[in-house]
Amino acid sequence: MQNNDILHTERTVCIKRWYLLAVTLTAVIAPLGCMSAYNAHSVDAPDGRHSVYCHIRGAGGRSYLAESYKKIFIEIYAVAPDAKERAERAKQEAVANLWRSDYNPSTNFPVDTLLFRSVYRIKASALEWTAQWGDHDALSILFYDYGPGVEGPVSAKTEGQFPKRFLRTLVYRFDATSNTYIEEPVK
């Protein structure tokens, strides 16, 4: 009888240790969540033929507001000719609940063509960007923040109250012969 009691006690202690380890790991890992903040959106050219997508990823484990190196992914696409109509049709179908299954017929379309992709790094606080489309599909991207530790305006009304700190400008031109965008040196 004593041997059974000892085995039972050892098993109980072993199970409690594994349970304690699992609870500890869960308590340590769960609050970490996403390890880096990001800022991403796209800007279409005025004629709607091209679009630039910029994804800015903050430093791992740091606030996006912290002065740190941010990784920037830039992609420029040739937009499919009927992209606006397809997007509008998909919105209307979603609102009207026209399709009742997981398959949405309006999403079965040709994808946009990638014309350029590159990765950059910039040291900044809450890094923002703006795209300026010029003549002949020229594109300039301006990167800025509002200074170390400053989040910047929350609305358009307060935007003028925060001076921008311009950090970098990237310039691209469209090369029709190769059907790609080429990065140009900043003048």
Image (spheres, helix red, strand yellow):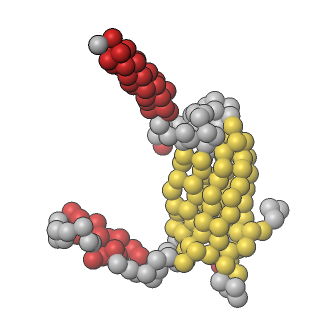
**Residue 21 falls left or right of residue 45:** left
Screen quadrant of the C terminus: bottom right
Residue drawn at x 55%, y 39% is 35
Q: Does residue 17 show up?
A: yes
Q: Quadrant of residue 14?
A: top left
| Residue at 63%, 32% in the rendered image | 66
Q: Residue 60 appears in which quarter of the rendering?
A: top right
Q: Position of residue 42 (x, y in %)?
A: 52, 61
Q: Nearer the viewer, residue 35 or 95?
A: 35
Position of the N terminus by quadrant:
top left
Residue 5 to residue 86: above or below:
above
Q: Is residue 105 above or below residue 68?
A: below
Side of 4 relative to 169 (left or right): left
Q: Residue furthest bottom?
A: 177
Q: Measuring from the top left, give residue 155's x and y in whole percent.
A: 46, 40
Q: Estimate the x, y position of residue 119 in percent, counting from the top left.
A: 68, 58
70 above or below 84? Answer: above
